[in-house]
Image (cartoon, helix red, strand yellow):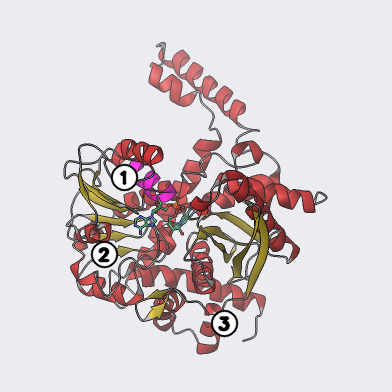
Amino acid sequence: MNDVKTQGLSFRQSVNHMVDRALTALGIEPGLARAMKTCNSVLQVSFPVRIRGKIEVFKGWRAVHSIHRLPAKGGIRYDLKVCQDEVEALASLMTYKCAIVDVPFGGSKGGLHIDPRQYDRDELELITRRFARELARRGFLSPATNVPAPDVGTGQREMAWILDTYKTLYPEDINYIACVTGKPVAHGGIRGRVEATGRGVQLGLREFFRHMEDVKAAGLEGGLADKRIVVQGLGNVGYHAAKFLQEQDGAKIVAIIERDGALIDDNGLAVEQVRQYMNETGGIKGFPGASYVEDGAAVLEKECDILLPAALEGVIHTGNAARIQAKIVAEAANGPVTFEADEILRSRGIVIIPDAYLNAGGVVVSYFEWIRNIHHMRFGRMERRFDEVRGQHIVSALEMMTGEKAPDWMHTELVRGADESDLVYSGLDDTMRLAFQDICAVRDMAEGRHDYRTAAYMVAVQKIARSYADLGVSV
Ligand code: NAD
């Protein structure tokens, strides 16, 4: 098997070792523990596509880690590092993630071994449609059992192609539109999904900073304002997280690490401008007004308050963990810290806010999108005007009782029904707050008092074990 090595352990082994800490702390019996960690099924496909007159063979995978809840849910990644070990690891993370944030899905993940930058739009459409057909025909794509979403190298566009392919194959499936999430709003997507994972990172960090004792244990004080953040990866997740943290919380983005190097400015980089520059030039090199460092990975070791890896797995490993100088490592990406590095960071008192909690915003809003799709109606459609009229009645009653005109701000706030974006934001905020509080509630049972990863996995494992017991699964 082609494994992603994160030092001695593969990515899948690294995740399993981390989960073992939670299984041991909870005293889960070995058979059940093994059952929980085992991937339920993995599909590997190879298919030919004619590109520029020549036949190319593409290899892809879809792993289903757990079906204790259905559908199984998880992104599709386009990257040259994709392999079976990686999709299995990512599928298992999805199982735990869904359990932590109370999303009733199993865990899945897919990937295609491809560098999407080497193909034009039409070629990618051909490849994606062919991959989607392979998945659908083998039962690895369906609104009831397996629902993909975007991940590294894919986005709304790919989800629209997958949706259209599924619809063509199964037009009689009344819920066909729910076969993928993260699709364009015009095709049944939900407002707020594109930025959901980055938004969730922001909301998760805000919740952490509401817990003063935890902030103090990380060697920090106060809120997010002026906290110095180093971001790795200015893609979907990193860009939105950094932008929101900068523009809405007053944090300072002191370094941005990308494929082609890193930008540093201790006074804070303008995230929106860097992203626009990247869109125009394909990289960050040459961005005016900031220092440029060619060895981007070295900038992970820059002194800062929060290190926010938002690119790929295994970037903090035994080779650099001892030199990380951040107070908090906020895992916006999946698996950015290896098992061994996790032990080193924690022994040095560095707080890790784990991926399975912090980047769950994407799957939370995907859940809302899936519900919207099987509901066949956008959220807020029935009640928005009703709420507005009721708000108007309240304002009129207040004005009548006081004999004074309500101030404009009060009028605006009260005479307004929530639209879909408001509801999505509110649902995501509530979910991220409650999940962190659940983690804090078991945190003291974990061996290291500020081991949030083990605590998060304990939350997940308890729920999954209960589900296995309720379903009467014999192991
Ligand atoms: P993306 O493809 O939009 O962005 C990844 C970014 O990382 C790109 O800008 C890329 O240039 C950069 N990058 C790649 N290699 C790099 C390197 N070696 N150093 C620095 N930068 C590098 O992907 P994304 O959707 O933002 O996903 C990023 C991470 O977040 C992944 O681990 C993914 O699994 C995880 N995640 C994504 C979502 C989602 O909704 N998209 C949800 C949960 C978790």
The residue wearing badge 3 is 35
Q: Which residues are magenta?
A: 234-244
Rendering quarter of residue 393? top right
Judge whether residue 242 is colored magenta. yes
CA distance separating discs 1 and 2: 29 Å
* Residue 93 or residue 395, whichever sits in front: 93
Q: Nearer the viewer, residue 51 or 133?
A: 51
The residue to which callout 1 is attached is: 284
Q: Is residue 401 above or below residue 202?
A: above
Residue at image mark 2: 351
Q: Does residue 409 appear left or right of residue 415 in this picture?
A: left
**Label 1 Cα neighbours within 10 Å, binned few <14 / some 14-19 / many ≥20:** many
**Badge 1 vs badge 2, beta-carbon distance below 8 Å:** no
Q: Nearer the viewer, residue 184 or 233?
A: 233
* Residue located at (69% from left, 57% from top): 130
Q: Amino acid at mark 3?
A: Ala
Q: Nearer the viewer, mark 1 or mark 2?
A: 1
Horizontal relation, residue 200 to residue 155: left or right: left
Residue 65 within the segment the image draws in magenta: no
